[in-house]
Amino acid sequence: MHTVQDPLARGTLIARDEVAAICGESTLSYWQLNDRVHRLAFALSELGLSAGDRVGIVAGNCHRYVESYLAVPAAGMVIVPINTRASEPEMEFVLRDAGVKVLITDRAPARYEAGLVSVIRMPEEYEDVVAAARPEPLHIRPSEEDLAGIFYTGGTTGRSKGVMLTHRNLISNAITALVWAKLRKEDRWLVMAPMHHAAGTCLVLSSLWIGASQVMLPAFSAAGALDLIERHQVSGTLAVPTMMIAMNDEQTARPRNIDSLRLLSHGASPAPVEVLRRAHAAFPKAELLHLYGTTETAPIATTFQNEEQHLNDELAGSVGQPALGVEVAVFDPDNTPVPSSAAGEIVLRGNNVMAGYWGLPEESAKALEGGWYHTGDLGFITEAGYLFLNDRLKDMVVTGGENVYTIEVEDALYQHPKVQEAAVFGVPDERWGESVLAVVVPRETVTEEEIISHLRPLIAGYKIPRHIIIQNEPLPKSAAGKILKRQLREPYWQGRKTRIGN
Amino acid sequence: MHTVQDPLARGTLIARDEVAAICGESTLSYWQLNDRVHRLAFALSELGLSAGDRVGIVAGNCHRYVESYLAVPAAGMVIVPINTRASEPEMEFVLRDAGVKVLITDRAPARYEAGLVSVIRMPEEYEDVVAAARPEPLHIRPSEEDLAGIFYTGGTTGRSKGVMLTHRNLISNAITALVWAKLRKEDRWLVMAPMHHAAGTCLVLSSLWIGASQVMLPAFSAAGALDLIERHQVSGTLAVPTMMIAMNDEQTARPRNIDSLRLLSHGASPAPVEVLRRAHAAFPKAELLHLYGTTETAPIATTFQNEEQHLNDELAGSVGQPALGVEVAVFDPDNTPVPSSAAGEIVLRGNNVMAGYWGLPEESAKALEGGWYHTGDLGFITEAGYLFLNDRLKDMVVTGGENVYTIEVEDALYQHPKVQEAAVFGVPDERWGESVLAVVVPRETVTEEEIISHLRPLIAGYKIPRHIIIQNEPLPKSAAGKILKRQLREPYWQGRKTRIGN
């Protein structure tokens, strides 16, 4: 019975003159934010759009992104956040696939805009539209089951798919997040991950619902993030592992006063335990909180609270326990639950699970078979209810009949003090089918032999990479900071089919 | 899409071997609690009861109360908690009115049990039933809209009515409470208010959902409560004001180590600010959190977080802001919203609002007119969204055409250091219609004149009681600790009708 409109409505009631959003030199009170959201929603309805129409957005993190993210569903329409780092053909694909009519953008005019009903360019045009519109409350009341947004998956594997999330999905995540983040009105939440990604918008509705403030980081840099934490006394944030690595280094090299930071949550891809240990050393007062989820689960599925207390016990490396309202199970290939601690595919169920993939009924049916969302991730659940990830189904290396979970190898690599970044994947091998290969970006000069002898006591022989490529340029990453293994792997598989066929 | 079954299911998954409930010398793990709940639910279904049948309970706080509160709705039936201090005719009225078939009780056999299908007496019979039953999971899945319980209102005014609460209502409150209590797995929650009252069960589902522990206080005493807080390192509790008064005195006289107590929430009736100041002095490390609500709202409607920071500013005495998911408005007698800061009747809307009164369609329609629950409380909301209560509609005194809010007068009385308890109400007056009367229980000898001269600088002349009765015996209270003004007032109104006709 709640919709995306409700959090801002309550926030405005309980924190009318308090800070809702800080973006660069702009500070908006709840009253101001609410007024701008209503104006934008009214302006969109005046463009001749009707309920269910899609409105795209391509922009860096800013308060106008928050406004669009709220106004579009509030007006009964569907928001389509688009990856800022997409190529022109990729942009065009998403715009056509989703049938976007209006685009809100901070980019320069481009060919892919042809055919749209309207383009609202930020900041000038956007501000003109907001200034000219009436701030009237809209008399639209979407239902819980209505689509609120279509979120295109990052596409680290395969073609980008539009994940359809309803009001109920987003509200369900907002409730879950209020619980794990223990948000309160006095909190300032730093929005660090890009807002076109679920990690960027994960806390937007929760923060508004409780009347807290959000601080926007337009484009990530470790120095920029730490400066904002110090300047605005930020209480919590959500990082992806590559951000955490950079922030650990920056805080160690040039410490800021970050005592206000009580919560450092992280997710989007698995964080090596060594990275978490460094984070705990660099941010000793912050609770570390591991989040696991997918765009399809809006996004949070499991949480590991106070992870910093378990970095050296048997729970180290877990992604935690089912989030409130989310059921987690592990299935074998026949969709039968496996016993405790046995490995299989992780499946999820709850109010947070997507309605399906836009325009892809067959893939939707397959992903949601039996009422469970099939993540494609491999893992197991202990009797105590802790989930461990083994690997992406597609990332697992099968070498000489043995399964190698690349995360485990990466974790061992990160324990070497000279390793800055590492990625492990399978390459074709005449004899073994696949063999394990690692690409390492070092902090300082290091040899392949040094790394191999570091690994030997840590992991079984068949898991040790047969080749380690040491390179100085950073690993390729998605806009959300995920390492793009597909891109690293591709050259080795040219003209061949991988085991699983991607 | 959640029902009363879900919190225990998640609690058992994430905290299987951890403590779910402590009651006297008994400690139950989640696994044990879950097992006992499933056995009890199975046993109830074996008694020939079917979905929707009512099961009553009369008992002091204990882990068996928690089990019944969970097992009955889990089996698709309806729990009917009955006031332990009800007289035999009152018990009989509730049993007949609700059509109770099975009674779970810790009382001696009584005439009102005649005609029931079965009586399960605690502890022996109850334990036999649980031991004999199978612990199988029930294959019943109630819907959100199904009745979970009928909760008879305390009846401080008028006849007791059965408030029908659905699974959705109770789940909605559980979510709200998770947010305001910021509960976490490590917490220990002390259940102090009687569990037949909404204040007693307010946190039961929330605690289970997050995997926290609950400590039961079978019957309230300030010393007993403080001993449990010290012994079990209790992190939070919910008190009614009379409990808080007693705990303030006890902690001041015989201090315990209560450093673990981070949250002292209170509700059920208005707490004079002076009582809150004393609570802050006695429990300096605890957040004070004012809760306002009614049984009809399952129960929480507003929350005032960190109230201890506002005991001397313009927010002192507020009951806070709308709880998450609850809409609050103030209506005039024509059901039209009044402007900010104007007084009127407080009305509430949300997933937490009852389905109606059992068997009373006309009273239900009246109470829920226009989709809002009409509380019968008078108050106003400031522009900043803070709700202040003036009085119960029925408690307000009209003297010479002036409205006197009895809470305001009581608040002034409590500021006198010698005043232990105070109650203010209207009595018939030939000249003024009604006049203001106060009954005061002193800590030490005090005269009427002393009190009147204390009041003079604090409140307007027409609000000052024309008579103050000083008595040494404690004021009459309901089982939940609410002062029974009706009982104090009655003798004065014998044979007359009060203004509002009760």
Image (spheres, coloured by chain):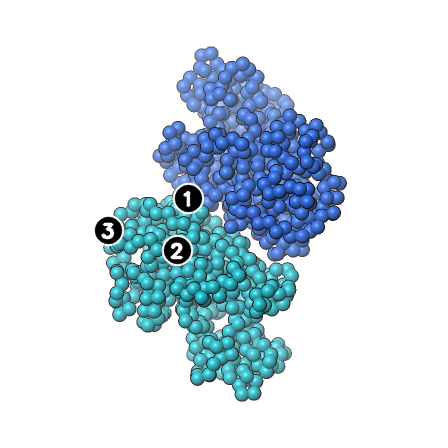
Chain colours: A cyan, B blue
Which residue is identified by label 2?
A: A148
Please say if the residues under marks 1 and 3 sit with CB atoms less than 8 Å apart: no
Q: CA distance from mark 1 to mark 2?
A: 25 Å
Q: Earlier in the sequence, mark 3 or mark 2?
A: 3
Q: Secondary structure at mark 2?
A: strand
Mark earlier in primary sequence (1, 3): 1
Marks 3 and 2 share the same chain: yes
Residue under the point 46% across and 79% down: A489
Q: Position of residue A178 (x, y in %)?
A: 49, 52
> What crowding class fits label 1: few (fewer than 14 Cα within 10 Å), some (14-19), or many (20 or more)?
many
Q: Quadrant of residue B125?
A: top right
Which of label 1 and label 3 is nearer to you?
3
Query: How busy is the neighbourhood of tag 3: few (under 14 within 10 Å), some, or many (20 plus)?
Result: few
Above or below for A494 versus A212 = below
Residue annotated with mark 1: A14
Identified by mark 3, the residue type is Ala
Q: Secondary structure at mark 1?
A: helix
Residue at 63% x, 54% y is B12
User: Which of label 3 and label 2 is nearer to you?
Assistant: 2
Is A63 on the left-hand or right-hand side of B305? left
Q: Find disc 3 in the rendering and name its residue.
A: A132
